[in-house]
Image (spheres, rainbow, N blue to C red):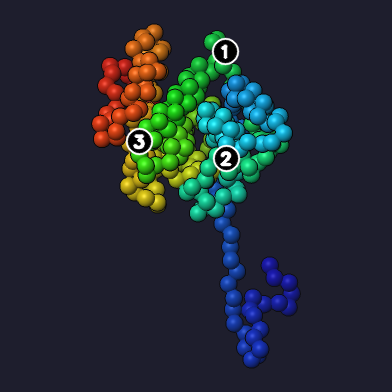
């Protein structure tokens, strides 16, 4: 409502009045705004505590720890989402988020701990955390054979490859979205938390179709390998050694094929 005696027109110097438009700011839909912080592995908090206690903050070292924990990395991206523009969203780095938050900000962001004991109720969730870490490291190693892909970007893409499954695994109650649809959940999270465009290879990107195609190939291969290793580990078979993984990762991209196993996919 306008005050009495005022109009929605602008008086010009020639005595004529001209209507003007009022801009309406549209707020983004917050589907996950009321959800709790994502949990972090105990060892992640321990390593961060040691790094943050140093006199000089090392953003790269802190980012390296975060890239080993899908909950920690995603939570940091989540709490810094409001400071990113659409342009910055394409190439955001975890170390940039670390600098933005600082020591106190990181401590405030990472508050929940994911129980990691053998008899805990988080066995399925912990499996995703472990597989995400392995997928991230494999993606980083594979990206070193592709000059057009930054290894750290591939690492983050591999780490967040299954982000669409996390809300359901964590028992979140979210209205307006089907948590049983990982693709829809991943797209909603990517939009709301302004995740970097290249961290979710399943989504269409606006920058560099050739590069995003390579990222998708890297992450898909890394995930298939990480899933196979996880299944072998759970079944007690030990054919996949660290040397085997390193040898596979040293292959040129043209020779890479997802590993063929009889294990069911646990996607």
Residue 85 to residue 232: above or below:
below
SS assignment at label 1: loop
Q: Is residue 89 visible to the viewer in this orientation of the structure?
A: yes
Asked if labels 3 and 2 touch by Cβ distance under 8 angstroms, the answer is no
- Judge from the rendering whether residue 37 lies leftward or rightward of residue 250; answer left or right: right
Local packing at callout 1 (Cα closer than 10 Å; few below 14, some 14-19, many 20+) is: few
Would you name the residue on which mark 1 appears?
Answer: 117
Q: Nearer the viewer, mark 3 or mark 1?
A: 3
Residue 138 to residue 215: above or below:
above
Residue 100 to residue 25: above or below:
above
What is the spatial separation of the Cα atoms under label 2 and label 3, in whole angstroms? 23 Å
- Residue 150, by quadrant, is top left
- Judge from the rendering whether residue 263 lies leftward or rightward of residue 184; answer left or right: left
Counting from the top left corner in percent of width and height, residue 168 is at 49, 28
What is the spatial separation of the Cα atoms under label 1 and label 2, in whole angstroms? 30 Å
Residue lying furthest bottom = 14
Would you name the residue on which mark 2 appears?
Answer: 95
Would you name the residue on which mark 3 appears?
Answer: 145
Foreground: 257 or 174? 257
In the image, what residue occupies the spot 62% across and 25% down?
47
- Judge from the rendering whether residue 258 lies leftward or rightward of residue 63; answer left or right: left
Residue 202 circle label: none
Local packing at callout 3 (Cα closer than 10 Å; few below 14, some 14-19, many 20+) is: some
SS assignment at label 3: loop
């Amino acid at each position: 409502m306008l005050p009495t005696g005022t109009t929605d027109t602008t008086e010009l110097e020639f005595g004529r009045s001209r209507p003007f438009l009022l801009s309406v700011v549209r707020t983004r839909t917050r589907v996950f705004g009321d959800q709790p912080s994502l949990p972090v592995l105990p060892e992640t908090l321990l390593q961060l505590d040691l790094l943050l206690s140093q006199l000089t903050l090392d953003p790269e070292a802190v980012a390296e720890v975060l890239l080993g924990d899908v909950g920690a990395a995603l939570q940091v991206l989540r709490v810094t989402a409001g400071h990113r523009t659409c342009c910055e969203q394409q190439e955001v780095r975890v170390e940039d988020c670390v600098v933005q938050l600082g020591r106190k900000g990181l401590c405030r962001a990472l508050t929940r701990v994911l129980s990691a004991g053998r008899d805990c109720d988080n066995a399925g969730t912990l499996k995703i955390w472990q597989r995400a870490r392995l997928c991230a490291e494999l993606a980083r190693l594979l990206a070193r054979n592709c000059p057009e892909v930054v290894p750290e970007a591939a690492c983050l893409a591999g780490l967040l490859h299954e982000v669409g499954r996390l809300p359901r695994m964590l028992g979140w109650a979210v209205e307006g979205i089907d948590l049983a649809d990982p693709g829809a959940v991943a797209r909603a999270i990517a939009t709301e938390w302004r995740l970097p465009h290249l961290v979710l290879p399943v989504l269409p990107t606006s920058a560099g179709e050739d590069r995003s195609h390579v990222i998708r190939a890297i992450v898909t291969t890394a995930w298939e390998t990480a899933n196979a290793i996880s299944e072998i580990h759970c079944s007690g078979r030990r054919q996949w050694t660290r040397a085997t993984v390193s040898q596979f990762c040293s292959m040129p991209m043209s020779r890479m094929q997802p590993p063929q196993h009889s294990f069911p996919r646990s996607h």
